[in-house]
Image (cartoon, rainbow, N blue to C red):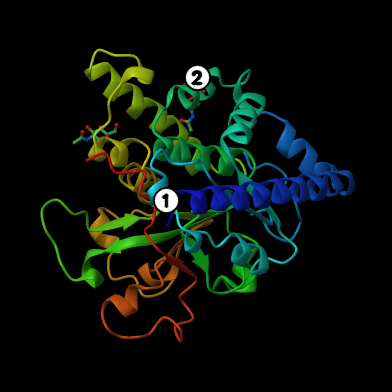
């Protein structure tokens, strides 16, 4: 593409973002007026290990879609096909949709955490890598406000309301996580690969969910550990690709989710006990979905041409996030 085509693309994104933000703000204003429980949940300080009042008496996870768009430094990673915002909007009728950009992110973090958790705000502002910022921000949004987060390079295949969960269960579910990698089904093991990994490109959570509270703390500690090892402050620290994955990314997320599962179910001793998952597995209010749910292309990767018919296939991931890699 010629440079001015990129420019047009940015303009398009800016217009879309502004429209979505205005629409979301307007709807949320309306909803807050109708429902004071939402107001107290979104304006107050995050409550840890205590469930905030649900936005609707029917389900714990609010009907809200979050996406994050931080302009990456290398504009070549963008192309017009890399966003499915309109699919998220059309697959989630009756939901609020919010696209969060750099300035919205900073404003959200300051208004939500600057006084109640200055360590959270300081950590967020010290991050330079947009991938790490986006990782940390999704945990903060879900912890404080709840809803469904999904990366810009994901496409929903079925309405979010239909996500597999039987109606009776839906009301009790506070955290939906999917496998990104299942060694028993992906078909190979090596010493560097974990037996399973949970993806964090798509997560749905109730506000104040304890796993998110843990993840926020884990991330802050892990980031500062890396900086301390280098004798630097966080804003000057250098992160390898592995250190990103292991501080804010899916490796860290896997550790935290797994810790919670192990505490809830004594039969689960190691990640291997979660392999070969074929259908949702429940651990109290936490549900783990099989690898094809948030990585719908899984069956196609194995030549099975299956995802169009597989009712477990919910979200397709296009792996276009070029900003994470450091190498
Ligand atoms: C997270 O850290 C804060 C501040 O250090 C602490 O008050 C809180 O109990 C911790 N929460 C969890 C879930 O560990
Ligand atoms: C990954 O992060 C955890 C949590 O901060 C840390 O304990 C561990 O040492 C890290 N792993 C490596 C290989 O650096």
| Residue located 67% across and 49% down the image | 15
Give SS at disc 1.
helix
Query: Is 67 above or below relative to 221?
Result: below
Q: Is residue 15 visible?
A: yes
* Location of mark 1 (residue): 264
Counting from the top left corner in percent of width and height, residue 63 is at 69, 57
Q: Are marks 1 and 2 in contact (CB under 8 Å)?
A: no
Percent of width and height locating residue 189: 14, 62
Q: Earlier in the sequence, mark 1 or mark 2?
A: 2
The local secondary structure at tag 2 comes to: helix
| Residue carrying label 2 | 122
Question: Neighbour class for label 2 at 10 Å: few (<14), some, many (≥20)?
Answer: some
Towards the viewer: 183 or 29: 29
Which mark lies nearer to you, 1 or 2?
2
The quadrant in which residue 29 appears is top right
**Quadrant where the image shows the C terminus:** top left
| Quadrant showing the N terminus | bottom left
Compute the Cα span from label 1 to label 2: 32 Å
Number of the label disc, if any, that sits on residue 48: none
Looking at the image, residue 120 sits to the left or right of residue 298; the answer is right
């Amino acid at each position: 593409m010629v440079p001015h085509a990129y420019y047009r693309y940015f303009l398009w994104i800016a217009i879309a973002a502004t429209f979505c933000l205005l629409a979301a703000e307007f709807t949320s204003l309306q909803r807050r007026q109708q429902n004071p429980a939402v107001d107290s949940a979104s304006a107050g300080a995050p409550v840890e290990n205590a469930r905030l009042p649900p936005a609707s008496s029917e389900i714990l996870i609010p009907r809200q879609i979050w996406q994050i768009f931080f302009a990456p430094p290398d504009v070549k990673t963008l192309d017009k096909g890399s966003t499915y915002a309109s699919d998220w909007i059309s697959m989630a009728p009756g939901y609020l949709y919010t696209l969060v950009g750099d300035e919205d992110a900073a404003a959200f973090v300051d208004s939500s955490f600057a006084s109640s958790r200055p360590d959270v705000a300081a950590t967020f502002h010290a991050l330079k890598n947009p991938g790490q910022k986006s990782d940390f921000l999704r945990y903060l949004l879900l912890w404080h406000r709840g809803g469904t987060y999904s990366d810009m390079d994901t496409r929903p295949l079925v309405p979010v309301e239909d996500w597999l969960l039987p109606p009776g269960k839906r009301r009790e579910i506070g955290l939906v996580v999917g496998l990104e990698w299942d060694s028993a089904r992906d078909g190979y093991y090596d010493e560097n690969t974990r037996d399973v990994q949970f993806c964090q490109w798509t997560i749905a959570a109730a506000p104040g969910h304890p796993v998110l509270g843990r993840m926020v703390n884990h991330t802050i500690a892990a980031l500062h550990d890396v900086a301390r090892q280098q004798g630097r402050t966080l804003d000057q620290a250098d992160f390898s690709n592995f250190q990103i994955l292991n501080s804010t990314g899916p490796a860290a997320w896997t550790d935290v989710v797994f810790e919670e599962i192990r505490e809830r179910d004594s039969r689960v001793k190691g990640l291997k006990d979660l392999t070969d998952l074929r259908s949702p597995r429940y651990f109290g209010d936490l549900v783990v979905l099989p690898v094809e749910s948030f990585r719908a292309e899984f069956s196609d990767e194995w030549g099975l041409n299956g995802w169009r018919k597989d009712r477990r296939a919910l979200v397709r991931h296009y792996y276009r996030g070029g900003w994470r890699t450091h190498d």
